[in-house]
């Protein structure tokens, strides 16, 4: 492996000392930057109300209050909000897997007329800030074209805008491009239709990238704040982020911090469980034919 510092200098005592010093400093700094906010979030929920708002803040809770998390779960109705969020997130995931996989497969293997033009137009939408699209999206779900349906306060208002995800389609297309065309030709010779080829050959080989797309779909819905706040005005149907904000009036600050810690836990656990699939999916670039 080629580095800025030659290997002969790294093998010397001074080189080893400098190497381990720099490595230790970098690891400690990055650990503090990433773990520090999570530590403050978790320990903030364990402190009393007076300790949370005191200045300067304390690094460790002087007295641990485990009951704050139970209070947050009960008073802010975390269970119902968590169910709503899971319902919206996995509904969006199901639609994205069906439509994005079909779009990427058709662009990669079926190669329709003007397919490259369509792909270029989809990728061009990635350059548009998401905030610019809020107004046209809201007007669309307010009066769905042709059908003239009002989707506000329905799950469709969250699911439909997430279906056509240009980044996920591009990610899937790149992976499908790496699947040898000879493999699909052999399936066609055996009489397999394009749909049978997709179901029996392409999808089983695409588990890593499907895992990455699934994680992106779930996390995008889970962390979104502005769009669910616009299209889900009913408190009983809101997601975790919006529900905690709506119900936080008059609630002690340590209880709100505990509720935010509970809301963050599922996505962190989701990443820790599937981190190997995420890394393998992001680094898988091709298959050997």
Image: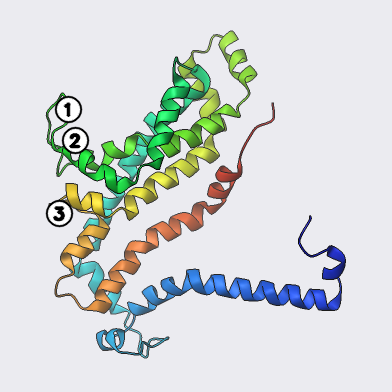
Identified at 49% across, 68% down, the residue is 34
Where does residue 2 sit, x and y in percent of width and height? 79, 56
Which of the 4 image quarters holds residue 112?
Answer: top left
Q: Residues within 10 Å of mark 1 (few under 14, many from 20)?
A: few
Q: Residues within 10 Å of mark 3 (few under 14, many from 20)?
A: few
As displayed, is residue 239 above or below residue 49? above
Number of disc labels:
3
Q: Nearer the viewer, mark 1 or mark 3?
A: 1
The answer to which of marks 2 and 1 sits earlier in the sequence is 2
Identified at 23% across, 57% down, the residue is 81
Proximity of marks 3 and 2: CB atoms separated by less than 8 Å: no
Q: Residue tagged by mark 1?
A: 145
As displayed, is residue 239 above or below residue 59? above
Task: Answer left or right for 288 relative to 200.
Answer: right
Task: Answer left or right for 115 relative to 86.
Answer: right
Task: Answer left or right for 96 relative to 186.
Answer: left
Q: Residue tagged by mark 3?
A: 236
The answer to which of marks 3 and 2 sits earlier in the sequence is 2
């Amino acid at each position: 492996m080629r580095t800025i510092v030659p290997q002969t200098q790294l093998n010397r005592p001074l080189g080893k000392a400098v190497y381990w010093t720099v490595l230790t400093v970098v690891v400690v700094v990055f650990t503090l930057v990433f773990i520090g906010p999570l530590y403050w979030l978790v320990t903030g929920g364990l402190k009393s109300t007076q300790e949370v708002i005191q200045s300067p803040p304390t690094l460790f809770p002087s007295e641990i209050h485990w009951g704050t998390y139970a209070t947050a779960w009960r008073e802010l109705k975390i269970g119902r909000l968590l169910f709503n969020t899971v319902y919206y997130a996995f509904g969006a995931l199901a639609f994205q897997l069906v439509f994005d996989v079909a779009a990427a497969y058709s662009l990669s293997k079926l190669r329709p007329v003007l397919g490259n033009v369509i792909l270029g137009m989809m990728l061009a939408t990635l350059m548009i800030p998401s905030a610019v699209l809020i107004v046209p999206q809201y007007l669309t779900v307010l009066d769905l074209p042709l059908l003239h349906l009002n989707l506000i306060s329905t799950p469709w208002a969250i699911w439909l805008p997430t279906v056509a995800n240009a980044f996920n389609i591009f990610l899937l297309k790149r992976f499908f491009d790496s699947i040898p065309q000879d493999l699909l030709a052999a399936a066609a010779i055996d009489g397999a239709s394009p749909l049978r080829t997709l179901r029996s050959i392409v999808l089983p080989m695409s588990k890593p990238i499907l895992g990455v797309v699934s994680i992106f779909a779930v996390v995008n819905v889970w962390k979104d704040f502005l769009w669910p706040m616009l299209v889900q005005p009913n408190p009983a149907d809101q997601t975790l982020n919006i529900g905690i904000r709506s119900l936080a009036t008059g609630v002690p600050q340590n209880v709100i911090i505990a509720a935010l810690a509970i809301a963050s836990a599922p996505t962190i656990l989701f990443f820790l469980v599937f981190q190997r699939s995420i890394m393998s999916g992001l680094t898988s670039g091709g298959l050997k034919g």
